[in-house]
Image (spheres, rainbow, N blue to C red):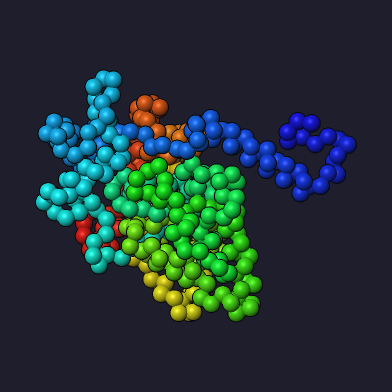
Amino acid sequence: MEAGHLDPDTQHEDLNGVIRQHAEWLAQQLYAQRESLFPPDASKVMRKFTSGEAATLLGVNDSYLRKLHLDGKGPSPEMSPGNRRIYSLTDIQELRVLLEKTARKTGDYLPGRREGDHLQIIGVMNFKGGSGKTTSSAHLAQRLALKGYRVLAIDLDPQASLTALHGVQPEIDLTDGGTLYDAIRYEDPVPIAQVIRKTYIPNLDLIPGNLELMEFEHETPRALAQGQAGLFFFRVKEALAQVDADYDVVVIDCPPQLGFLTMSALSAATGVLVTIHPEMLDVMSMSQFLRMTADLMDVIAESGADMSHDWMRYLLTRYEPSDAPQNRIVAFLRTMYGDKVLNAPQLKSTAISDAGLTKQTLYEVERSAFTRSTYDRAIESLNAVNDEIAELIQNTWGRGAS
């Protein structure tokens, strides 16, 4: 029998058995794909950066980097066959530390928290699939890490797409727990540090997700009925308090539903980013999402929680400037919400989707893998979005963009 087809004589085969078998087939194929993409140990490694890319990330001229190299200051970059300098992200971070020591202004090269700054926790949410929530979360977390922030990315979505993008296959690598559920469950929660993983990107750690997160959705009603849940919506916030000093920014990829996980993430968040695909059905869905969110926040606030946030913004995703209906909706949203809509939209691009086919973000792939104009257009769009959010973070800390 071919995969995916039932023999006529087994039309009454147990549906549960069929689904389980299909899940196992798919898991095997995904594992084989990962092995072929990231041999020999199936782990991802971040690419190297040209001297021009490194200079841009640092905010200096390439000629200045060359001078540092010739003067023997900082790390020694790898030299390409064409005798060009190539920098790893570890090299770039070492350069940040070096440059910060002689910077005219504190934070020019290390833009993270200073004494008195509170941890920024950004909840990325929308309960409609296809709004670009995970794509936005992944690129935001990686861009902030590339710019020198200490970032923790949390996959709170049981579908675990953010986890897969970072080289962790939930059904293979998380068979014995390892998600945020372990740190927020009602019985014997573990310290959150036990579920944090280093990634292949310096400055970026990950708490992966899988279907086990749904246990929190199932257990909370029972715990509430038994009087054991307490203020359940504080559980994410209390878990993050354990590692408050270790990070500048936390990016939470929330589930596409307004359940107990999302409510707890909302209670922890200092900033909320709502992704919007500018199509009429999506905007209609968002209307319901906002109404339900407001009602839930009222309930949580009545229980004593502080539901104020530093900022809330709408991010336009998969935007096509040549699409007239989309433009009308974008104009409508900007008229209605004003500066609550980010100035920079995330453009729809084949470069972003093609990178996703190999479980990569656009920051991980080489420019040479795409048509130059396609890559440049997409990366400029992503950088504009993420740098605008970085400016919000800096403003929250009482200073301009870094």
Residue 159 versus residue 371 in the image, above or below: below
| Quarter of the N terminus within the rendering | top right
Q: Give x and y (percent) for residue 295.
A: 51, 71
Which residue is at the front of the view, 79 or 164? Answer: 79
Q: Is residue 229 visible?
A: yes
Q: Is residue 280 visible?
A: no
Q: What residue appears at the point 40 percent right and 51 percent down from the top-left corner?
A: 205
Residue 172 as seen in the image, left or right of residue 239: right
Q: Looking at this rendering, what residue extends furthest in the top direction?
A: 82
Which residue is at the front of the view, 68 or 20? Answer: 68
Q: What residue appears at the point 54 percent right and 35 percent down from the top-left corner?
A: 34
Q: What residue appears at the point 60 percent right and 46 percent down from the top-left corner?
A: 171
Q: What residue appears at the point 11 percent right and 34 percent down from the top-left corner?
A: 71
Q: Looking at this rendering, what residue extends furthest in the right direction?
A: 9
Write down the quadrant of residue 228 in the picture.
bottom right
Q: Give x and y (percent) for residue 182.
A: 54, 61
